[in-house]
Amino acid sequence: MGFGSGSAMKVRLLVPNAYSQIMIMNRFVRIALCLAPLSLAGQQLPADLIVTSARIYTVDESHPVVEAFAVRGGRVAFVGDARGALTLRGPQTRVLDLGGRTVIPGMTDAHGHVSELGQTLAIVDLTGASSYDEIVARVAAKAKTVAPGVWIEGHGWDQNRWADTHFPSHEKLSAAVPNNPVLLERIDGHANLANKKAMDAAGVTAATKDPAGGRIEHLADGSPSGVFVDNAQPITQHVVPVASHEELKRQLQNAIAETHRWGLTGVHDAGEPQNILDIYEELGRAGEINSRIYAMIGDDSTAIMKAFARGPQSAMYGGTLWIRSIKLYADGAMGSRGAALLEPYSDDPANSGLLKSTPAHLLDVATRALKNGFQVCIHAIGDRGNRVALDAYESALAASPTADHRFRIEHAQNLHYADIPRFAKLGVIPSMQASHQTSDMYWVGTRLGVSRLPGAYAWRSLLNTGIVIPDGSDFPVERVNPLISFHAAVSRQDANNWPPGGWYPEQRMTRDEALKAMTIWPAFAAFQEHDLGSLTPGKYADFVVLDQDIMRAPVETILSTHVISTWVGGKMVYEAK
């Protein structure tokens, strides 16, 4: 695909096999750890915790299913049978007899938004609303609890769930809540709905121009409808009062606690501003991050330059925080018709979506990131957005050949068939969210037309090229529960087991792949495979206890599985009541 020089050709040949090569090297490391001395002055060192009487899926090919493991100093010390594990029992060792329960490695959401989840937990929850009237009613109920003039924020509206799937307009909301400015974020985070009070506060009029990469929707009389898409969102967002430092810190902590409730021990936090990164470090220094946070730097030139000057930061504060990647945006989202397409939307022939960043900007940041040892993760949903991102990566790698860059495309939802092989050829990781497929399948055919659907959520087509797919949820766009994505990956069906046989079922993952997609593959996608992703001696003892065996239970019962407890570094961070 344009590689001509010898050095560039080496990148092309070596990168597709990077995952396999690194896993082989890790096996040698694991062997060394297993053979490391377990005694001091002739005495065997006891374990802090022994987990036994369980069906344990390790995601380690050398011992994939075992009945016990031991933990010492926050890391796995032994994996195998109960007899072997119990030889490490000492007077202070806690023995956890699970009575046949199922254990899997701690799950990692490879694409979530922690600060946004924290904000969502603190504002009006609009998810699941089946009509615009229901949205208005929830906001009006909130307005009764606050003083006039106080901003009301909400998240989660989705017009595709309503009988009328057109974008809403502000009139009904403005009439119901006239005395409070209201700003409501769409479920995908790529559009806002503002009432008249909020638009007046932002100085929005019929004369307000669309910014590059953004769109203001208008009513028939030319006045703004209240909907602001992609790069138009800051027009109203910038007048919303900013949360205090302490409020943001509390929201982050609440969000992390929420992820534990669903069995997540780590999150790839997909794009945060500098002030949130600073709070993470503040929490880390205080020993108050009880998760594995892989925080991506948002697309801000000052924050990026600061990071380049400091260099990549890995496993800080006891292996709880990584800052070594940058989040960029190629396009918008499919639900708001902001995803950039090669051909117009089937249900909006005058619209081909939006490019949120110029190709030159993507190339510039990617090239500088390679030179400074940073990973780049580009949001791309439409087939044109993905092609632009792949083109930027190809040019950056030609300019600065790097064998183990692990560049990522976040979402990769709709691909042109000619671009599917390019991920493997360039060594680009598609970070995808299986739950998006089961949320979008009802209406995405209307957006794209039948001819483009084989390239939508094409997990099997990508896996067959030899690459890995780290899975996530994109919370709070989707629910936090990672088993929703696990179920979607293996069934291509919703919670009601629709459609029969699955939506384009040839694109399904196996259960082994789906489990790797939420454990070892996210670890690889974040340069963490030496420490995370499997229950292997020497790695952090992050694990989840489930009340059902998701690897053997009937597919239709997977979503009834509950998390009994979540453990990070051998310490319980969540226990079901």
Image (spheres, rainbow, N blue to C red):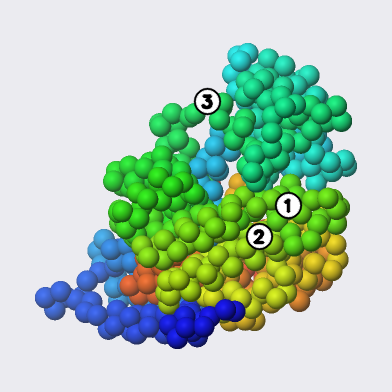
Q: Amino acid at mark 3?
A: Pro
The residue identified by callout 2 is 385
* Rendered view: 197 above or below 414: above
Whole-percent x and y of residue 181?
65, 22
Which one is closest to the eye, mark 3 or mark 1?
Answer: 1
Let me know if residue 63 appears in the view. no
Whole-number angstrom distance, CA of label 2 to CA of label 1: 9 Å
Q: Secondary structure at mark 3?
A: loop
Other residues around mark 2 within 10 Å, as few (<14) / some (14–19) / many (≥20):
many
Other residues around mark 3 within 10 Å, as few (<14) / some (14–19) / many (≥20):
few
Give the left or right position of residue 327, taking residue 308 as reference. Answer: right
Q: Nearer the viewer, residue 422 or 251?
A: 422
Mark closest to the chain's N terminus, 2 or 1? 1
Q: Amino acid at mark 2?
A: Gly
Q: Nearer the viewer, residue 259 or 307?
A: 307
Q: Secondary structure at mark 1?
A: loop
Other residues around mark 1 within 10 Å, as few (<14) / some (14–19) / many (≥20):
many
The residue identified by callout 1 is 353
Q: How many marks?
A: 3
Number of the label disc, if any, that sits on residue 241: 3
Give the left or right position of residue 414, taking residue 266 as reference. Answer: right
Residue 405 lies in quadrant = bottom left
Question: On the rendered image, what quadrant is the N terminus found in?
Answer: bottom right
Residue 249 lies in quadrant = top left
Give the left or right position of residue 88, taking residue 205 as reference. Answer: left
Whole-percent x and y of residue 511?
63, 74
Mark closest to the chain's N terminus, 3 or 1? 3
Q: Secondary structure at mark 2?
A: helix
